[in-house]
Image (cartoon, coloured by chain):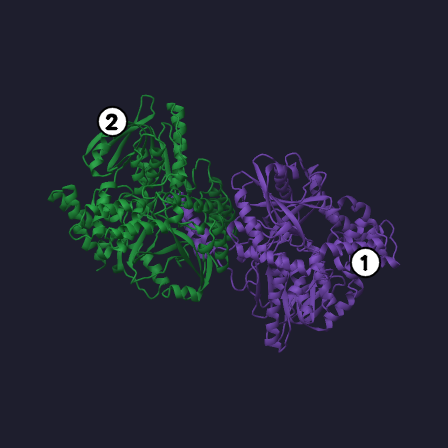
Chain colours: A purple, B green
Amino acid sequence: MSFSQKTCSDIINHLKNDQLDVLAIGGGITGAGVALQAAAAHLKTGLIEMQDFAEGTSSRSTKLVHGGIRYLKTFDVEVVADTVQERAVVQGIAPHIPRPKQMILPIYDEPEATFSMFSVKIAMDLYDKLANVTGEFANKVISKEEVLQLEPDLDPHNLLGAGIYLDFENNDARLVIENIKQAAADGGLMASHVQALQINHNEKGQVNGVHVRDLLTQEEFDIRAKIVINTAGPWSDQVRKLDTKYHGSQQIRPTKGVHLVVDDSKLKVPTATYFDTGKQDGRMVFVIPRFNKTYFGTTDTDYQGDFQHPEVTQDDVDYLLEIINRRYPHVHLTIDDIEASWAGLRPLLSANGGSDYNGGSDYNGGTKKSISETSFNQLIKAVNQYQSGKIGRSDVEKVLNNLQAAQSEKTPSASSVSRGSSLTVDDDGLLNLAGGKITDYRKMAAGALQKIKSILAADFAMQVQLPDSKKLQVAGGHFDPTQVDENIKKYTQIGVDKGLSEAEANKIANLFGSNAPQIFALADHTTAAPGLSLGETLALHYSLDNEMTLTAVDYLLRRTNHILFEADTIDQIKQPVIDEMARYFQWDNQRKQQETENLDKAIQQSQLADLKRQDD
Amino acid sequence: MSFSQKTCSDIINHLKNDQLDVLAIGGGITGAGVALQAAAAHLKTGLIEMQDFAEGTSSRSTKLVHGGIRYLKTFDVEVVADTVQERAVVQGIAPHIPRPKQMILPIYDEPEATFSMFSVKIAMDLYDKLANVTGEFANKVISKEEVLQLEPDLDPHNLLGAGIYLDFENNDARLVIENIKQAAADGGLMASHVQALQINHNEKGQVNGVHVRDLLTQEEFDIRAKIVINTAGPWSDQVRKLDTKYHGSQQIRPTKGVHLVVDDSKLKVPTATYFDTGKQDGRMVFVIPRFNKTYFGTTDTDYQGDFQHPEVTQDDVDYLLEIINRRYPHVHLTIDDIEASWAGLRPLLSANGGSDYNGGSDYNGGTKKSISETSFNQLIKAVNQYQSGKIGRSDVEKVLNNLQAAQSEKTPSASSVSRGSSLTVDDDGLLNLAGGKITDYRKMAAGALQKIKSILAADFAMQVQLPDSKKLQVAGGHFDPTQVDENIKKYTQIGVDKGLSEAEANKIANLFGSNAPQIFALADHTTAAPGLSLGETLALHYSLDNEMTLTAVDYLLRRTNHILFEADTIDQIKQPVIDEMARYFQWDNQRKQQETENLDKAIQQSQLADLKRQDD
């Protein structure tokens, strides 16, 4: 079942000629999840993405399946329970991707600390209870001395100790591509680099398809679909604007999150670490080891710029370096230490007060729900009265207290299929699945499929049987999720038997899961490409054949994260990869030149070359 | 050990002539707790109270030793842990007073509900864990049907079910008098109706006593004391103003709490019930059965009026009746159903943002800590920018979210001996123990005694041995706190053996604890006074002899709560009580007339006679 450039024209032809049951606009985690479930339900499914799959947003998260322990501060136990339970579901359907990873939460005796040593223990106990965590992964508290043994560079001043609890790391871009691949394997027509230009309607004014442009050929055509679902993440509002029948207001209010990567010789943490910024801004920051690198983030700033290319700014760098250099007073990181970076948008719903109950990572102070009109007006009035001397500061605080209570106690609206996301049907039938957190993608998609099922039954007399989405494993995830280590080890051994080094075989097994044996099998008729190891060659070939990898950036940034976490070998590998892709795709010199330029640009952007230049 | 009008002049003489180690100004629970511990430490202890003991504030609480489950909404686990652990301590030192009482917390599906069925279970589990509650008192959730079986009058509309958990009822005024009696028994000079007029200083400007007026004789005199401690509750600021050396700012910002009592034939609840007001104001209201009555409250309004006589207003009545009539749609309570009432002030610290972490009952929305100057200014700035159109509503919400995080995460200041209270030493040596919640009185006093010990050591070369205050039982509480029911039963039997009815003997045993046998022993040489039962006669005699009961109001309102919870027999008992007191104190007719008028006034005030008259 090839899913590659070779099958592109086939997919496009089907999109042109078939009438689809469901067409998703947007190939991030939201659309990928919908497509997987729709295809598994034997619906004629299509998905279009104007960039590479996951390129816009879903490859730019904190790369954790974070349980949100911080939400316990506002006793949002339903949210935490939902998240940690759904995390277990995702681990079951994509067992090679989310991996348990202990998290250290150092506690400082400083103003506005999120947790004290006492409350962190209570929070972790509650968290473990909600997540049903026991045994080796059960939380514990450690003393200041034990923290400093683990992280000798951590600031000892005012350090009280730490909590250690279970969190999960994630590979966001691979979670998307494995969903996309699975949908394709189940008959879904999954097309990257196809842009929606206009929503089409039938004579009754109901949505019946999308007018699109194939950005690789510049050809425009119509795709006919019974149901069109907008899964465009930060672009949701733009997609809605393509629908001339829609006159609603803006739904998305994105914020930008930035992560920076340094070599672990500059900053080494034994496991993921999560602490208050120390800036009394109510935020927390992650410091996470991956391969031989350490990355940290995120920022959380309102974003109004170009959605397609959110950039890391000097302010972002300054903010994060200030925090890291405060917490690790000996490391003295500067911008020159940054080997890679990424910036991404959180597709937050403005109805949620622009905060991310289920955003890619979590920020913002306390509550995450919007404030009622009445409460908001009360506040404005109180501030005015305060300023005109009619009431005292304490009266304003009283209004704030009440407002806060109201805010933190608001129940989620019935239309939200999971907290922080929303599923709406416009008057013309356009479905919109927006907001949400990566961890919730399966649940959000399941909610959308329920709606799709009922529309197909009501309007098209179609009876659809929905499979249990909790059991639909993604590509690469077809193995026993309770036996992850054993299976990874087994796959690794197959690679070793084919002549790969153990490290390389293990890396491939971790990235590609149950597809690893298929990769290793390529060794029977493949030799190492010039400048690449055998393992690198096999993985590249597999990805080109099966993962709709069209460019070197697709491969080195999103399919493998090489640009992010192996920056020190990127110069050495980039030309051999391009050479091998050129050979594989039979690129001419001009195309090869273009690809090289694009790759260099992506690497420079990740390495913050422009900012470093300004700095000199 | 008599402690009565007969010993008054003796106490006053000692206060005039002795040099005290410690003098407390204010005979509510704060001063009573300090006096008990100081006397137990063999310090020469005095206390002056300008009204009856507990009259101003400490007899006017919700009469619960409430664990504060609602604070879990903001994950204030330290506060809840402190409170429930201290509650156990108080139960140990005053075992006849706080009694376990299950609390029903009905959950409604309505906007801004404090708890959902899920979160209330989690909150109760956490609460039981912090309080170490297991077994018969462990929390549980019940279905809507079970709630309605227990409380058939409760509004079934949107009712989801309820949580049931352990709380404790309290007798606030008796907790004060038992502390006062114990302090007196241990040598403390405890004087009611003595008013502080001025703080005295030595030649170095250090506090060395208080100039006072005996309000019963109008005599003025000086009391000399090494240490003076201001325990005046809502009057703390006024007492400080008596100190000409003090120029600080106002510390207390009281709010008023109102409770109303109706007969249980009008509104019957099987056990204490605690619910959201349904007004989306972030507040909750208690409905509590006691004897054959049901009382409910409280309001929470800023108070600037006369501290000595906080009154129930029409607005207070309207607010509470609206809530009760909403939650119990069939009861249709009107002001004419109100048999008794009380209004009291919470001595909240303005540094706490005027909210009551540990106030007499609990209100206010979410956080209870003050907002930093910076955060507050950020908010004011944001609202101004919003109003001038420079930023959007969502930006204001973002500021609010951060502010809220900062607010809820603030660590308590080191000077607070328990949350919500403060212990300060002014430049001239005046100690001030202010704020706090009834439940925390023992802990607050223990903090003050530590300070007193160190001052006596440093300035007076006195070595003081402080006993373990967790083990200092109050008067009436000298029995095994793990055997409360057994002891009450045993005491009751003694009363029955002396010829009292079981109900009456039981009532006396419950009110007076280990002093009940002493009361029953009076039967050997006492017969029933005209119009009073034998039990009533004995209890009155005991109280006159041993509880510094000087007026009929002291007895019927504070020593027994008769005015509050037995309003239907008050007309029948009031004259016989006055007659017997007149005989006992040898009042002349004029005094008797005056006492009758005072009692009638207290009864009318409790019954809201003025408001009812306006209503007609």
Residue wearing tag 2: B17
Residues tagged by mark 2 and mark 1 found on one chain of the structure: no
Q: Is residue A112 above or below residue B486?
A: above
- The chain letter for the residue carrying disc 2 is B
Instruction: Tell me the SS state at disc 2.
Output: helix
Task: State the image coordinates of residue B554 (x, y, percent, origin top left).
Answer: 24, 45
Task: State the image coordinates of residue A90 (x, y, percent, origin top left).
Answer: 65, 59
Answer with left or right where residue B202 lies relative to residue A207: left
What number is the disc on residue A519? 1
Task: State the image coordinates of residue B264 (x, y, percent, origin top left).
Answer: 30, 60
Q: Nearer the viewer, mark 2 or mark 1?
A: 2
Which residue type does callout 1 highlight? Ile
What number is the disc on residue B425? none
Q: Residues within 10 Å of mark 2 (few under 14, many from 20)?
A: few
Towards the viewer: B563 or A401: B563
Answer with left or right where residue B419 lies relative to residue B336: right
Q: Is residue B426 above or below residue A512?
A: above
Q: Residue furthest left?
A: B589
Answer with left or right where residue B552 lies relative to residue A441: left
Q: Is residue A407 above or below residue A432?
A: above
Q: Quadrant of the N terminus of chain B?
A: top left
Which residue type does callout 2 highlight? Asn
Q: How far separated are the C-alphas under marks 2 and 1?
A: 99 Å
Q: Quadrant of the C terminus of chain B?
A: bottom left
- The chain letter for the residue carrying disc 1 is A
| Circles 2, 1 touching at the beta carbon (< 8 Å) | no
Instruction: Tell me the SS state at disc 1.
Output: helix
Q: Residue furthest top?
A: B203
